[in-house]
């Protein structure tokens, strides 16, 4: 790496890689262990387990150790071992362990997540695919990393933690947006089907108040027909099931646009609108006849607002049948007002989709910003240098060659006491 500040240095990561002691927890069945495993990483808390529950050897770790996951698909995981809760601390073999008194562990944690290191790290991955792919520790040790003076390391960590807190708050706010948008959509539909959305428009056009009826007064229903994937012939006719379009076929079951509703299983009650000729499979029901007084786009909104899945029958396997559909409430109103409702709802939904798209863009940019900040930090550009800091070259002189880990187990067999 070129262009580092004068008081920085570069070292191979292997100078910080610890040779850990292997421990068989099952030999101490009643002892409690803090186990740093890859699955527990998501909770940022080690597992609390008894020795008898652990079926394989583990490596002994200490507070301040920095763990770098070496297996696919968890290569992005980096963990700092926390202070011991008066228990023996162990880690699974999926981690490469780093340990030194001359590098701030949180500096190292951030560094191992920085884009330049990740690029070099991923280049060490080999294997035959899937879970058998992993980074090669010997190759990882050769990766050169930038080492700042110890006091500057701590300033970098403090700055990164501050910026990370802001980023986390922003990400939390962005994560709330999809739920808010879904709530807004439901509120818009509720307003539309209460008559409130078009009340002024209705008065201006001299239209009567709504009547209330059931869908059976406007629709006739039919079940789709079985069409396995193997029987679908190449063509331009869309195939619809309970989850919407699932493929194409060379012939149609229905010729005109219609409403398609999921009939069974997790997709029951889902509502879709075909735009022309289509095939409907047997896990869906379709409207074989629609009264001329109904706009299909309005019907799509009405059935979605009805939340048909809440009326589904069955216990183990939920279903929506023609009886349930016929009994579903369906408003009776002028065709012109139906179209006005569709226009207003679609306009509002379009705006909400734009907001959702902007949210996704902002989330992407936030992730890019996080990476850019990390890159800047390890080029020595995030915090100012202090001429009074002891240079990193002095740290290198104190990095003694690693010795084998001493066996602290003497006499009767027991796990080493926490340090």
Image: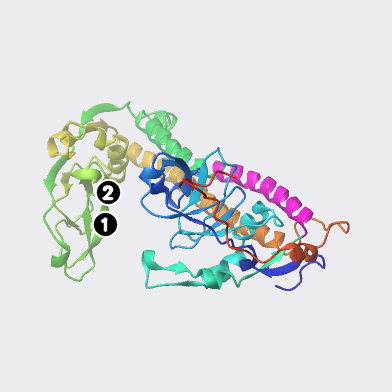
Rendered residue at 72%/49% (across/down): 159
Q: Which numbered disc, 2 or 1, marks the residue that appears first in the sequence?
A: 1
Quarter of the image with the C terminus is: top right
**Dot 2 lies on which element?**
strand
Which one is closest to the eye, mark 2 or mark 1?
1
Towards the viewer: 373 or 344: 373
Towards the viewer: 96 or 174: 96
Image height of 298 relative to 90, above or below: above
* Magenta residue check for 157: yes
* Magenta residue check for 165: yes
- Magenta residues (range): 149-172
Q: Which residue is mark 1?
A: 245
Image height of 350 relative to 116, above or below: above
Residue 109 relative to residue 77: left or right: right
Image height of 267 relative to 123, above or below: above
Q: Position of residue 391 (x, y in %)?
A: 82, 62
Q: CA distance from mark 2 to mark 1?
A: 9 Å
**Dot 1 lies on which element?**
strand
Residue 376, quarter of picture? bottom right
Please, what is the dominant secondary structure of the magenta stretch? helix
Residue 310, quarter of picture? top left
Which numbered tag is attached to residue 209? Answer: none
The reply to whether callout 2 and callout 1 are in contact (CB within 8 Å) is yes
Q: Which residue is mark 2?
A: 272
Q: Position of residue 287 (x, y in %)?
A: 17, 46
Rendered residue at 32%/41% (across/down): 301
The local crowd at label 1, few if under 14, some if 14 to 19, many if 20 or more residues have their Cα within 10 Å, is some
Towards the viewer: 323 or 314: 314
Image height of 290 relative to 399, above or below: above
């Amino acid at each position: 790496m070129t262009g580092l500040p004068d008081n920085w240095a570069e070292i191979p990561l292997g100078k910080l890689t610890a040779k850990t002691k292997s421990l068989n927890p099952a030999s101490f069945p009643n002892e409690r262990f803090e186990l740093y495993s890859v699955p527990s990483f998501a909770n940022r808390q080690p597992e609390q387990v008894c020795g008898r529950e652990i079926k394989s050897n583990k490596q002994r770790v200490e507070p301040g150790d920095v763990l770098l996951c070496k297996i696919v698909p968890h290569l992005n995981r980096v963990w700092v071992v926390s202070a011991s809760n008066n228990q023996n601390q162990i880690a699974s073999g999926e981690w490469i362990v780093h340990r030194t008194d001359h590098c701030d562990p949180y500096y190292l944690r951030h560094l191992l997540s920085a884009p330049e290191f990740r690029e070099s790290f991923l280049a060490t991955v080999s294997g035959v695919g899937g879970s058998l792919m992993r980074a090669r520790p010997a190759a990882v040790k050769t990766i050169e990393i930038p080492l700042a003076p110890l006091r500057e390391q701590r300033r970098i960590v403090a700055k990164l933690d501050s910026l990370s807190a802001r980023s986390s708050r922003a990400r939390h706010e962005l994560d709330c947006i999809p739920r808010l948008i879904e709530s807004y959509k439901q509120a818009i539909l509720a307003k539309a089907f209460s008559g409130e959305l078009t009340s002024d428009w209705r008065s201006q056009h001299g239209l009567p108040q709504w009547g209330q009826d059931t869908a059976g007064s406007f629709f006739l229903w039919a079940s789709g027909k079985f069409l396995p994937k193997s029987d679908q012939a190449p063509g331009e006719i869309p195939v619809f099931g309970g989850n919407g379009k699932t493929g194409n076929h060379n012939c149609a079951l229905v010729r005109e646009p219609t409403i398609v509703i999921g009939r069974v299983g997790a997709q029951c009650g889902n509502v879709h609108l075909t735009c022309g000729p289509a095939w409907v499979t047997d896990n869906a029901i379709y409207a074989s006849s629609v009264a001329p007084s109904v706009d299909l786009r309005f019907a799509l909104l009405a059935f979605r607002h009805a939340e048909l899945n809440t009326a589904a029958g069955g216990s183990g396997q939920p279903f929506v049948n023609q009886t349930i559909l016929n009994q579903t409430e369906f408003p009776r109103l002028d065709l012109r007002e139906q179209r006005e409702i569709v226009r207003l709802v679609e306009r509002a939904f379009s705006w909400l989709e734009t907001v959702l798209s902007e949210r996704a863009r902002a989330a992407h940019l936030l992730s890019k910003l996080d990476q850019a900040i990390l890159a800047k930090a390890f080029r020595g550009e995030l915090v100012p240098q202090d001429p009074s800091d002891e240079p990193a070259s002095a740290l290198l002189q104190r990095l003694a060659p690693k010795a084998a880990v001493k066996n602290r187990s003497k006499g009767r067999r027991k796990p080493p006491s926490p340090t």
